[in-house]
């Protein structure tokens, strides 16, 4: 397996497996459990996996966007797609964070509500902080982001990215709150919430797109 798995992914797997064995009292797996290795493991878990890196490279590649732009034959669609792809890629931030916190949140939400509330609050603060920083970068430096990734041929995506930037904060918070509903066992409420978001999204598009 180690020969077929990316080195970073294997390091994360070894660290998580060691933690599992140590937590439940099994014989320790051969893993260097130094402070430096724990720090490296923490940051490695935040990094995208080999599959995610490949998807991001292909998804944000100029060749792919050029083909999409030519196929759609609609400049507005291509420009919007170039800007929106930057928002979609950032969804990895709440995904990685909630992958680490959701098990603890689901376990404590019924048995220890106070601890669950503390965990929810801390996770919310991290997501809001990350969302604000990301939104600020896209608001202040949209030209740098677009030109670095796509070149000058997608200059029209700059104002689109600036308009979409504030939605990053809402997207990050939405990740947490929908997971919170699942942790509480409110699956139907989560589905109703998702349906309401879809209705608002489609309705807003119908109202705003003709004006633009």
Image (cartoon, rainbow, N blue to C red):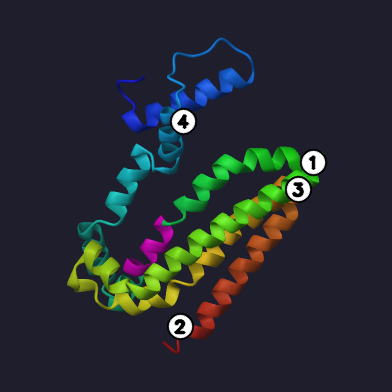
Residue 125: percent from left, percent from top? 59, 58
* Real-space Cα separation, disc 1 to disc 4, in angstroms: 27 Å
Badge 2 marks a residue whose secondary structure is: loop
Q: Which residue is mark 3?
A: 184
Instruction: Give the foreground label among 2 and 3.
Output: 3
* Real-space Cα separation, disc 3 to disc 4, in angstroms: 31 Å
Q: Which mark is residue 209?
A: 2
Badge 4 marks a residue whose secondary structure is: helix
Residue 6 in sight: no
Instruction: Give the foreground label among 1 and 4.
Output: 4
Q: Which residue is mark 4?
A: 38
Badge 3 marks a residue whose secondary structure is: loop
Badge 1 marks a residue whose secondary structure is: loop
Q: Which residue is mark 1?
A: 112
Identify which residue is drawn at 75% across, 48% down: 184
Task: Mark 3 or mark 1: name the one nearer the start of the chain.
Answer: 1
Residue 46: percent from left, percent from top? 44, 43
For the record, the magenta segment spans 81-89
Q: Which mark is residue 192?
A: none
């Amino acid at each position: 397996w180690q020969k077929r798995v990316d080195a970073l992914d294997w390091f994360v797997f070894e660290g998580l497996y060691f933690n599992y064995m140590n937590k439940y009292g099994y014989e320790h797996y051969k893993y260097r459990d130094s402070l430096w290795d724990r720090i490296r493991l923490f940051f490695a878990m935040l990094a995208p996996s080999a599959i995610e890196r490949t998807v991001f490279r292909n998804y944000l590649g100029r060749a792919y966007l050029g083909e999409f732009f030519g196929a759609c034959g609609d400049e507005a669609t291509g420009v919007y797609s170039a800007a929106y792809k930057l928002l979609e890629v950032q969804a990895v931030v709440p995904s990685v964070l909630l992958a680490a916190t959701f098990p603890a949140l689901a376990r404590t939400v019924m048995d220890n509500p106070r601890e669950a509330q503390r965990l929810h609050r801390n996770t919310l603060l991290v997501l809001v902080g990350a969302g604000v920083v990301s939104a600020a970068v896209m608001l202040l430096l949209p030209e740098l982001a677009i030109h670095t990734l796509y070149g000058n041929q997608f200059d029209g995506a700059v104002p689109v990215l600036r308009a979409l930037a504030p939605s990053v904060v809402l997207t990050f918070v939405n990740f947490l709150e929908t997971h919170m509903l699942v942790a509480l066992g409110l699956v139907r409420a989560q589905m109703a919430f998702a349906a309401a978001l879809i209705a608002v999204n489609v309705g807003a598009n119908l109202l705003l797109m003709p004006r633009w």
